[in-house]
Image (cartoon, coloured by chain):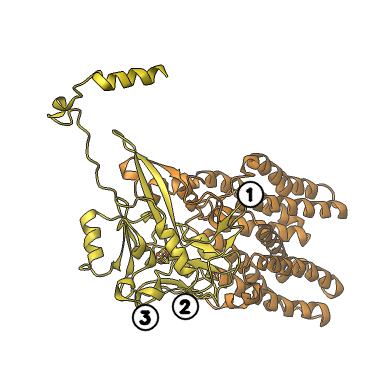
Chain colours: A orange, B yellow
Amino acid sequence: MHPAPSVIIFTTLSGLGFGLLVFLGLGFPAVSGWMAFAFFAIAYALAVGGLMASTFHLGHPERAWKAFIQWKTSWLSREGWCAVLALIIMGLYAIGLVFLDQNWSLLGWIGALFSLATVFTTSMIYTQLKTIPRWNMNLTPAMFLSFSLAGGALLAGQTSVAIPLLLISALVQMLYWRKGDQAFACSGTDLGTATGLGVRGSVRAFEPPHTGTNYLLREFVHVVGRKHAEKLRVISFVLAFVLPVLLLVLPFNHFFALLAVASHLAGVATSRWLFFAQAEHVVGLYYGKR
Amino acid sequence: MTQLPQSTDRKMGLVIDLDTCVGCHACVISCKGWNTENYGAPLSDQDAYGGNPSGTFLNRVHSYEVQPAEGHAQLIHFPKSCLHCEDAPCVTVCPTGASYKRVEDGIVLVNESDCIGCGLCAWSCPYGARELDQAEGVMKKCTLCVDRIYNENLPEVDRVPSCVRTCPAGARHFGDLGDPDSDVSKLVADRGGVDLMPEMGTKPVNKYLPPRPKDTVEDQIDILAPLLAPVAEEPKGFLSWLDKTLEKL
Ligand code: SF4
Ligand code: SF4
Ligand code: SF4
C-alpha cells in the first residue's frame, strides 16, 4: 500500500491523543484547573490534528460529514461517530475539571470508553480488509490499542503503567511482524486463484494491460522502500519501546520524560510507515507484483 | 444504503470467454468511449500525450502465460472489470452510502454526488475494479452500462453493454446469471465457468469461461505429405540461366 503521509500522521497522532484522553478520563493523573487545561490541550491537539490530517487524502473533503451516515455497516463511519462522541464527552468532562472544579467521573469513564472505541474502530478499518492479508489479523487491533494505551500512559506521566504497557506493545509488535510476514502466503490467494487458471498450470503475468502507471499501481503496489524494511523495523522498535523504557527506569527527570515521549512518537510513526508500505494488496497479483 | 440487499430480483452480469478473447483491447476503448461521456463524471486522463500517461479505465485487459505440467505454454488474454459481486465488500465499507447494490438487477453503482473519495471501497475490492478519478476525486467503476441496457432511445441491438457490443471475437456475453434458463447461465454450465478468487467470499456474478483444450499436434501430419514433396530440386532451362546470372551480379 502507498504509505500516504496523511494516514500515517493521522493514525500516529490520533492514537496517542485518544490514548491520553483514556487516562485523563479515568482520572490519571487527577488534574484540575490550569494543569488540567494543559493536559487536555495536548490531548485535543493530537487527536483533532490527526483527524484533520486524515481528511487530506479525501477526494472531496467538503463532503466529509456524509461519512456519518452508514454506521450500520461501515467501520469508517463508526470511527467518525466514536471520535466525535469521545471529543464532545471529554470536552464536557474537561470543562468541569478546568473551569468549574467539578470531577464528573462517570462522564470521564464514558469519554475514556469512547476514546478507546475510536482507536479500535480505526484499527478495524484496516483489519476488515481481506484483500490485505497482513492487516486482516486479530493482531492489528491489538497493536493499535496497545500502542495507543502505552503512548497515552507515557504522555500522562503514569510511569508505573507505561513500562508494562510499553513492554506489551513491544511484544505485540514483534508478533505482528512475525505473523504478518506469513500472512499473504497463508491467505491461499495467488495468481492461480486470481485468474481461475491455476488448475491448468503455473500462471505468469505476460503483458500488463497498460504501459504506464495507474491508480491501482500507485495506491496498492508500493515496492520501493520495502527493501529497507528490516533496518526500519529495528529503528522503530528501539525508538518506540526500548529507549522509552530505559529512560523511564532511570531516576525521574523532566527532560528524560520528554525524550521518552519524542522517541516513542518517532518509533510509532516509523512502525506505521512500515504498516502501510509493507502491506501487500492482492490486486498486485494481477500485475505480477505484490 | 450500504447494507447489501438480502437478494436481488435479477443478477445481471457478464460472462467472459477466455477461449475466444484475442486481446485486442477493443472493449477497453469502447468502454472508455461510452462511459466518459455518459453516466457520471468523465474518465479523465493525466499527461495523456506526455511521457508518463495515466488515466481512469473501467475495464482492462491483462495477458497471462500458463505453463501446464506437460506440453506447451498457452497465452491467455484476460479482460477484467467489476464483477458485480453478490457479497460486495466495496458496498459495505462505504461510509456515506455512495456505493450501493441495486435490488432490481444487482448492479453495483456509485452515487458520485455522495462520494467523498476516501478510496476505502477500492481498498476492499480484490479485483482492482475501482479507480479513483484523479480529476474529479470520486470513485469510478463499471456500471454494467446501466445507461444503455434499459435505454429505449437506442436501437434494441445496442441495448447491451458497450464492451459486449464491440467485442469482435464474441468473447463477452451479457445476461441474467440469476436465471438458470438464461443463455448466459447455460453457457456457464456448459463450459464450466469459474469465479475469480472464490476464497475472498465476494460471490462474483460475472463468470469466466476457461480456455478449451488445444488440438494436439501429431508427428505425422498427413499421409499425402510425402507426395507433396518438391519435385524439382534444381531449376532448369531459362530459370536456371536466370538464377545463375542473378547470382553473378
Ligand atoms: S468486483 Fe470489486 S468493485 Fe465490483 S462488486 Fe466486486 S468488490 Fe465491488
Ligand atoms: S470512495 Fe466514495 S464510494 Fe468509495 S467508500 Fe469512499 S465515499 Fe464510498
Ligand atoms: S459493462 Fe459497460 S462499463 Fe462495464 S466494462 Fe463493459 S463497457 Fe465498461
Q: Which residue is mark 2?
A: B1
Query: In the rendered structure, which amino acid carries the disc numbered 1?
Result: Leu
Q: Which residue is mark 1?
A: A274
Ligand number 3: quarter of image: bottom left
- B48, A2: nearer the viewer: B48
Is label 2 in a helix, a strand or a loop?
Answer: loop
Q: Is residue B204 visible?
A: no
Which residue is drawn at the image coordinates 52% and 56% (left, top)?
A138
Q: Amino acid at mark 2?
A: Met
Q: Nearer the viewer, residue A25 or B62?
A: B62
Q: Chain of mark 3?
A: B
Disc 3 secondary structure class: loop
Label at residue B153: 3
- Disc 3 marks a residue whose amino acid type is Asn
Q: Nearer the viewer, mark 2 or mark 3?
A: 3
Residue B38 visible to the viewer? yes
Quadrant of res A8: bottom right
Above or below: residue B53 compared with residue B108: above
Say which element carries label 1: helix
Chain under disc 1: A
Relative placement, left or right, of B143 versus A49 is: left
Question: Which image quarter: residue A110?
Answer: bottom right
Q: Residue under mark 2: which chain is it in?
A: B
Report the disc number at residue B129: none
